[in-house]
Image: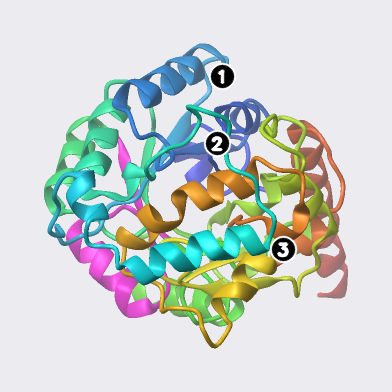
Amino acid sequence: MHSDLCELFGIDYPIFAFTPSEHVAAAVSKAGGLGVLGAVRFNDADELDRALTWLDDNTDGKPYGVDVVMPMKVPTEGKAVDLKAMIPPEHLSFVERTLQQLGVPPLPEGEGRDGVLGWLHSVARSHVDVALSHRPVLIANALGSPPVDVIEQAHAAGVKVAALAGAAKHALSHVRNGVDIIVAQGYEAGGHTGEIAGMVLTPEIVDAVGPDVPVLAAGGIGSGRQMAAAMALGAQGAWTGSLWLTVEEYDLSAGTGIRDALLAAGSGDTVRTRVYTGKPARLLKTKWTDAWEAPDAPEPLMMPLQNLLVADAHNRMNRGDDPETISMPAGQIVGRTNEVRPVAEVMASLVKEYDETVARLQSLA
């Protein structure tokens, strides 16, 4: 399992692992892949700085990346309190009424947050500034191309830039803006995702951007066989996420409901909805997502208002032990994450099955 990206980043395997956990990111990097820490959960620049300092000290000198959420166009932003004032009262009452109906308890005193401010453009820029004060080899953007000046800022620091794309036309736009690596994110993927399946999307993007722009396949990759399929489609590696949600290193000290829900879920137990952030994202299908499909439910708000609306609700649900009231981004590959294993074991099984698959295909040639 090797591609030019292994030489570019100094990694053993072209397996890129997006994760909100610095512990998982470090374990992936130490196992030969590239751990990519999701920065959106860090409301405070000092929090992100501490997490990246930990990564610097606990990756044995191995490379890692950072993922931010930054729209290409700067949205209108005000202070968090002004944004919250834009949330309609009927949305607030719907959320509180739904939490009561689902029996979700409030958080302990002093444990709530007003929302994940990492969805704001200005906070995402601060995430880039903090990241570049450390030693990432990659800055990835979950919402396509970051602004050109941010791309230039990363390049000036010797850091490559990746951007997610759900269509070939988006990938071409990213390349024109100076993005180095395209992540072809198929419909199957968890979190923000488009409407085209990976089997169709990956070769479309590979053909569109040409041989000089590396493409990572994302969505539905959780085994060595699927990794081999991605490479056969022209990708130079895989961008994975949901695969790492049930590893031993993932911190679930807040409650067991998330892991129980993930372990029990099948590939049909996710839904693509705007409930999470205001943009289409794939989540676990639970009583919470069902409530937003009811006839009396309001339409989800635009980003970042929807996140500010539901952030406290998500914290309350995810702190609990009820797997039926969880709000968790997860891709269709969640049907394969049905046991808890250490990162090193998951990596080893990916590589082993990949090698076996390539050997089997060669025997058929």
Circle 1 SS class: loop
Neighbour class for label 2 at 10 Å: few (<14), some, many (≥20)? Answer: many
Q: Which residues are magenta?
A: 159-182
Tell me the quarter of the picture where residue 266 sits: bottom right
- Residue 225 position, x and y percent, is 78, 62
- Residue 57 position, x and y percent, is 51, 11
Residue 195 colored magenta? no
Would you say residue 135 is visible in this rendering?
A: no
Residue 59 bears which disc, if any?
1
Q: Check disc 2 and report the residue beneath it.
A: 35
Side (left or right) of 150 relative to 307: left
The amino acid at mark 3 is Ile
Mark 2 and mark 3: Cα distance apart in space: 19 Å
Residue plotted at (45% across, 56% down): 310
- Residue 269 position, x and y percent, is 74, 71
Compare residues 179 and 55 and report the one nearer the observer.
55
Residue, far top: 57
Mark 1 and mark 2: Cα distance apart in space: 10 Å
Mark 3 and mark 1: Cα distance apart in space: 27 Å
The amino acid at mark 2 is Gly
